[in-house]
Image (cartoon, rainbow, N blue to C red):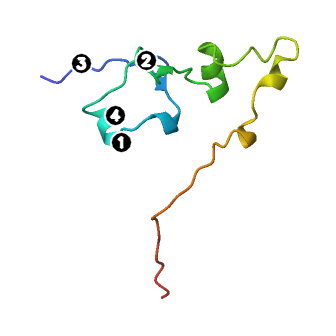
């Protein structure tokens, strides 16, 4: 007998953490060491949403819609959140 087709809600049960604070690999996170929201540095994520929305939900930044609080939130360009790829090369064969 075929399994029943169900619905899965995709906007719940997502977690976020700063990549520099996670020492596990993607494989470990999805198999042997899944994170929980009560483990530091993991926090509940806003999905769909943004990093700012997740930080706001977890009270890690002030409300940017109140007064001039948005001026105290560090801009992503100034946060040091750059991505660097190393050890990757691709060779193209000229034909």
Mark 2 nearby-residue class (10 Å; few <14, some 14–19, many ≥20): few
- Among the two numbered marks 3 and 2 on one chain, the one whose residue lies closer to the N terminus: 3
- Among the two numbered marks 4 and 3 on one chain, the one whose residue lies closer to the N terminus: 3
Q: Secondary structure at mark 3?
A: loop
The residue tagged 3 is 4
> In this rendering, which labeled residue sits more in front, label 3 or label 2?
2
Please say whether residue 50 is visible from this viewpoint. Answer: no
In the image, 29 versus 14, the foreground residue is 29
CA–CA distance in space, label 2 to label 1: 20 Å
Please determine whether, in this image, residue 85 is positioned above or below residue 71: below
In the image, 1 versus 95, the foreground residue is 95
Question: What mark, if any, has residue 13 been given in the picture?
Answer: 2
**Residue 74, how many percent across, how many down?**
75, 31
Please determine whether, in this image, residue 6 is positioned above or below residue 94: above
Contact between marks 1 and 4 (CB within 8 A): the answer is yes
- In which image quadrant can residue 62 be found? top right
The residue tagged 1 is 25
**Residue 6, how many percent across, how many down?**
32, 18
- Among the two numbered marks 4 and 2 on one chain, the one whose residue lies closer to the N terminus: 2
In the image, 1 versus 88, the foreground residue is 88
Mark 1 nearby-residue class (10 Å; few <14, some 14–19, many ≥20): few
Residue at 26%, 33% in the rendered image? 31
Please determine whether, in this image, residue 18 is positioned above or below residue 85: above
Residue at 51%, 39% in the rendered image? 20
Please determine whether, in this image, residue 43 is positioned above or below residue 17: above
- Among the two numbered marks 1 and 3 on one chain, the one whose residue lies closer to the N terminus: 3
**Residue 14, how many percent across, how many down?**
46, 22
CA–CA distance in space, label 1 to label 3: 33 Å
Question: What mark, if any, has residue 29 been given in the picture?
Answer: 4
**Residue 41, how many percent across, how many down?**
47, 24
């Amino acid at each position: 007998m075929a399994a029943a087709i169900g619905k899965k809600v995709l906007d719940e049960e997502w977690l976020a953490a700063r990549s520099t604070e996670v020492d596990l690999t993607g494989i470990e996170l999805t198999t042997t060491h899944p994170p929980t929201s009560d483990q530091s540095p993991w926090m509940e994520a806003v999905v769909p949403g943004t990093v700012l929305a997740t930080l706001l939900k977890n009270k890690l930044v002030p409300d940017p819609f109140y007064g001039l609080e948005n001026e105290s939130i560090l801009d992503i360009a100034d946060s040091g959140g750059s991505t660097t790829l190393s050890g990757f090369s691709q060779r193209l064969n000229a034909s």
